Image (spheres, rainbow, N blue to C red):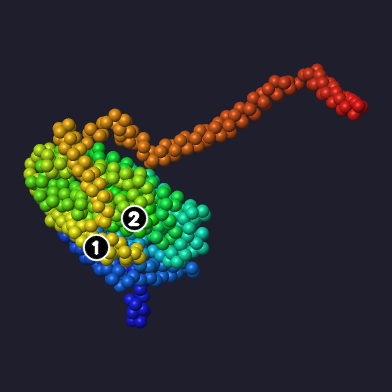
Amino acid sequence: MFKTICALLGDPVNPMISMCALPVAGGVLACLSRGRSRGALRMAVALLFGAANLVFALSLYLGGGASGALALGVQGLELRLAVSGIAALMLPFAGLLFLIVAVYAASWFHKREGGGAYMLLLFISLGMLNGALMADNLGVLLFFWEGLLCTLFGLLLIGRRENSKAAVKALALSGTADLILMLGILATARLAGSASMSEIAARPLSADGPGALGCACMLLGAMGKAGAMPFHSWIPEAASDAPAPFLAAFPGSLEKIAGIYLATRIVTDLYEFAPGSPMSLFVMVAGAVTLFFGVAMALIQKDMRRLLSYHAISQVGYMLLGIGTGLPVGIAGGVFHMMNNALYKTGLFVAAGAIEDQTGTTDLHKLGGLRRAMPVTAACFFVCALSIAGVPGTNGFFSKELIFDAALESGTIFYVAALAGAFMTAASFLKLGGAAFFSEARLPQGRRNIREARLGILIPAVLLAALCVLFGAYNALPLQTLIGPALGDAHIHAGWPENGTLVLLSSAVLLLALADHVYGRKKGGGALAAADHIHYAPGIKQAYALAERGLLDPYNWLMAAANGFSAACAWIEGGVTWFYDKAVPGLVTGTGQTLRRFWNGSVSRYLIIAVAGVACICLIFLLAALGEVAP
């Protein structure tokens, strides 16, 4: 027995198995917490199990990774895991974010219903994410990938009854993306002759010709998990009803990590992804469309949750644009931007949750002057807002400049789209910050005294803002110490961008956004109306109206097609039923009645019919004989 335990502890696969099993155990403990002390117990579970997961992840990262396989009792079936490269980096990063988000969730649900179920599913989500990051077999990856979809669906069902609509929408869109991913995995494994990612990486497949289908399908699956268009519309739907911690955990961080990780593996390991190739163009177009239209919708929102949810979509576009270039600087920029986005977007969602916790609303019509009532929350919000806007010196600025550089080298139109997105990002956060924190002080009905958020919510916000500052002030840490070695490129430039012209153009775009905000604020009569002159501009107003009615939502197209198919099937079924239930019996009955009237027992009628029959036969023989005699 002792030897068996020692062998298990010495097996490198066991720490990796622990990273899948440990979160599940933590979730079960949090779910079973009962009584008045359940809030404290959930906080303890979040801290202990979150920290333990982070320690395991750091040990694998600092130890240079690991690999191994666990037989599952069926011949030829094994759980093959491997930690190296980008996976080794993502594990501790995801673990750190999870620890912060879990503490926030435990504090949020301190006196709210549904906390046990939420913590259970959140911890299971971490186990599934860890499994997806460590999977060395495409089939194993798909298993954990689908596990994330299941927990997503469950988390969306927690809370108000209206959540079911968002849950079904998420299941339909993400499920469609996962189905496409499965097709891509099958095509890739068939073409490579193996489902092992390590074996495929040793001899990457061509993304052109026969490999194009597998590559495109796998990339679409990764985009769907990250929340890119056209798999995005469940996120704003969920933003209206889902618990605030859900937004910080899923659209804010965990799903972005999973989706961008897989996209990076596809581009760098599984396929030969040439810059300027059709596949590169496909990914860049998807990124440009996502970043532009996502932020365009964010610009007109009047609710903090929905505004941030559209930004969660838009920022994926920058990541895909960078990765899609296929250039080392672009791929590094995409990964760096994913890490930055996870920090500042989660921080923004936490700040929004703090405001909602104290005021009971995120409707910007009902908020104002919060910088005095909630100064720490306001400070954290503005650090994260400056980062997402890409203000020079922030972490978001450095990752965006890498993407801008790669986009310009790949095509001017992609660079212009990225700049347009940067303009609208800055404009929308000027509107949001001005309306919530700097406009005339007002409180929602029934709220007389607004105080700073609880410590369990403030600490995560402060930590996330501090990490944004750290990654901006010392960008060599993430770029050269973390991302460069993970991607196998030690020559990634850190520090201030080398292309001063691009920096000047980016700064000019931010100043233009500020000028536009000042103009819109004066014209509209307040910060909340600062973007109305764009929203209601001729031509643009009609496009926004179509979007707000859902006519441009691919989910609605899918549902319309499904309803049309269902109606066609119902029509065909009705036709078949009518044919067998009415037409055939009616024909038989009518024929029988006609024959009954005709064969009425008259001997003379029968004789006439017999003579006519004989005459017809004679006529046939006569015509045949004449045909034979004719020359």
For this orientation, the residue located farthest to the top is 604
> Could you tell which of marks 2 and 1 lies nearer the N-terminus?
2
Write the residue at 47% across / 37% down.
Answer: 565
The residue closer to the viewer here, 50 or 530, is 530
The quarter holding residue 169 reads: top left
The percent position of residue 562, horizontal first and vertical second, equals 44, 39
The amino acid marked with disc number 1 is Ala
Residue with the mark numbered 1: 476
Residue depicted at 35% across the width and 82% down the height? 3
Q: Which mark is residue 330?
A: 2
SS assignment at label 1: helix
Residue 125 in the figure: left or right of residue 218: left
Q: Name the element at disc 2.
A: helix
- The image position of residue 555, as x and y in percent, is 38, 41
Picture quarter containing residue 530?
Answer: top left
Q: Considering depth in this image, is 41 or 608 the residue closer to the camera?
A: 41
User: Which residue appears at 32% of the width and 44% of the height?
Assistant: 417
How many numbered discs, if any?
A: 2
Q: CA distance from mark 2 to mark 1?
A: 16 Å
Q: Residue at x 10, y 38 (%)?
A: 440
How far across and how far down the image is residue 596, in percent? 70, 23
Which residue is most to the bottom?
3
Q: From where the camera sits, is residue 280 visible? A: yes
Observer able to see residue 235: no
Q: Mark 1: give few (<14), some (14-19) or many (20+) Cα within 10 Å.
A: some
Viewer-proximal residue among 326 and 527: 326
Vertical placement of residue 481 versus 284, above or below: below
Q: Amino acid at mark 2?
A: Gly
Q: Is residue 479 left or right of residue 365?
A: right
Q: For the C terminus, which image quadrant?
A: top right
- Mark 2 is surrounded, within 10 Å at the Cα level, by few (under 14), some (14 to 19) or many (20 or more) other residues, namely many
Please tell me in which quadrant of the rendered image residue 123 appears.
Answer: bottom left
